[in-house]
Image (spheres, helix red, strand yellow):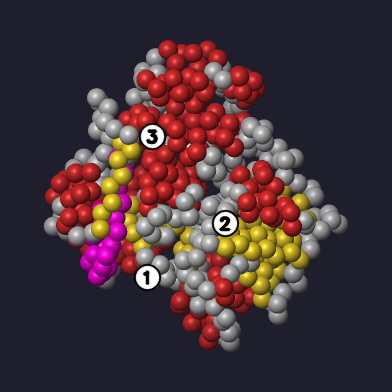
Amino acid sequence: MCGICGELRFDTSAPELSVIERMKDKLQKRGPDSDGSYVNAPVAFGHRRLAIIDLSEKAAQPMVDDRADVALVFNGTIYNYPDLRKELQGLGHVFKSTGDTEVILRAYIEWGENCVVRLQGMFAFAIWDNNKQILLLARDRTGIKPLYFSQTSQRLLFASNTQALIHADDKIDVSVDATALHHLFTLHGVVPAPRTVINGIRKVKPAHYMIIANDGKVKEKRYWSLTAKRPAMISGLKMTEQDWVVAVHDALRRAVEKRVKIADVPVGVLLSGGIDSSLLVGLLAEAGQEGLKTFSVGFEDAPEEKGNEFEYSDAVAQMFETEHHQLMVPNDQVLPRLPEAFANMSEPMFAQDAVAFYLLSEVVSKEVKVVQSGQGADEVFGGYFWYPRMHHSITKGINRFSDEYFDRDHTEYLETVDKRFAVKDVTSELMQDLLNEVEADEYLDRVLAVDVTTLIVDDPVKRVDNMTMAWGLEARVPFLDTQLIELAASMPPAMKLPNGGKHVLKELSRGFLPDSVVNRSKAYFPMPALKYVRGEFLAFMKEILLSDGAKQRGLYNPKYVEKLLNKPEDYLTRLQGSKLWHLAALELWWQQNIVK
């Protein structure tokens, strides 16, 4: 897990090492162990390393093969690299290191751009082929690893976060992308790739790679699609519920085990107390993992809502005898750290638990370098309350989705923002196109496939990556294992929706996890202070939104801001998020990352 960056010039000028150094400065937290650079006009690469696999200098990056005249920078982990290494050795390749980085390099030398299809894991990488004078940028299937870029007629810059790009070139267009703004306020902080809220910065799409020639021409290709149909059979017979339970148990166990085996450092678990992270702990214990460290975080209660789930995480830790660490964060420590957390977000995020993950990661990073986390289970196995509503709805068209999911209808978006950012209903159009693209048997299959391949990338996957990597901590997400996702996509809704959602996960957990964890109702990460906006938190948001900078930027309609400030607890989204917090969060992110 690392931070990567680079520049490709399209004009006659050579890339400057100072540009790479500026980008590496903003990637230091992602890779605190060491750094390296590579310059070979018209390209230059930079790398910040977090050493997880092959801790020796032989695995340092940028990694170059002089004979093939190919260079690589890579962020992520390839879980099938031992098998690929053996295959490549059989084809005559000789390895100098023992890690996964060199496997990618030699896979490209052997198979060219088609190497991407063979990689299983989480990754973002760039390869410069000096003979062909092309740059290959690639991103994993579910976008676990980020990859941003900025392209002009003179050059292309790429990096693991937006901050590195902005720091490298003060001429990047940092004006607001109105289409992205519509997505952001409609999809609770999600801006599907390739857009970002910044006009001059884009991101590589998940499950895609791009080939950029030295004249600036770009070829983009999708290398994986998720099909959501019912081919799953055993010996030609329809699978029973027990068959599904066994199949999911086996697939999840394999996903968990390979994410602990492929590491030369200890691996812990972020244990929320929900069924997802609890299953990870149980499966690791089942696999014989000893000395497992688990970590939980909680916040102060509000009158309407409890601020922690310690009673559940404690029960799991006790059952499996983990070395458990509990972090309780009082409200007076949340506000002072909010700006700091937002300064480490590549894009603005609205989810309450972004700050929680940031604070927890600080503690966890002092104990381990790698953690497993349960993100993705709700999207893969249908755990949210809006899924059955969509499944049973008889509403036609995009409203079947938007009536349950959109934070704001289009008319309210127009009321929210300044008229400069008024656009047509671009989010409805995009979501309808995405749903139509999926090969699926039922409507819910389409919804879950789009969630897993598009929406989840920005919430919660990006949140976990950004907040853990801010402390040099690698987070692995077994529920987004490709084979597990494909199995779940072939599963009928009847195996997902009953029992309050995630039915098959609950069935495989009975007798395996504490009953209190299995039988509890679905909970959402509690951080009451950012949902029930009052007291010093309300004053904080008011100060942000009424600041001189906010007024000069003029993102919002002042009348809408005033309406929300007058009754902050009355305006919640369909998913029960604070609309006032959404506005304050974007403005706070802008102040921390864009304002010079």
Query: Which residue is drawn at the image coordinates 47% and 51% (left, top)?
Result: 471
Classed neighbour count for the residue bearing mark 1: other residues with Cα under 10 Å, few (<14), some (14–19), many (≥20): few
Percent of width and height locating residue 473: 44, 55
Q: Which residues are magenta?
A: 277-298
Cα distance, mark 2 to mark 1? 23 Å
In the image, residue 587 above or below residue 142: above
Residue 261, numbered circle: 1
Badge 3 marks a residue whose secondary structure is helix
Residue denoted by label 2: 3
Percent of width and height locating residue 91: 56, 85
Cα distance, mark 1 to mark 3? 36 Å
Badge 2 marks a residue whose secondary structure is strand
Badge 1 marks a residue whose secondary structure is helix
User: On the image, which quarter does residue 14 sit in?
Assistant: bottom right
What residue type is disc 1 on?
A: Lys
Query: Which residue is drawn at the image coordinates 58% and 69% (left, top)?
Result: 60
What residue type is disc 3 on?
A: Gln
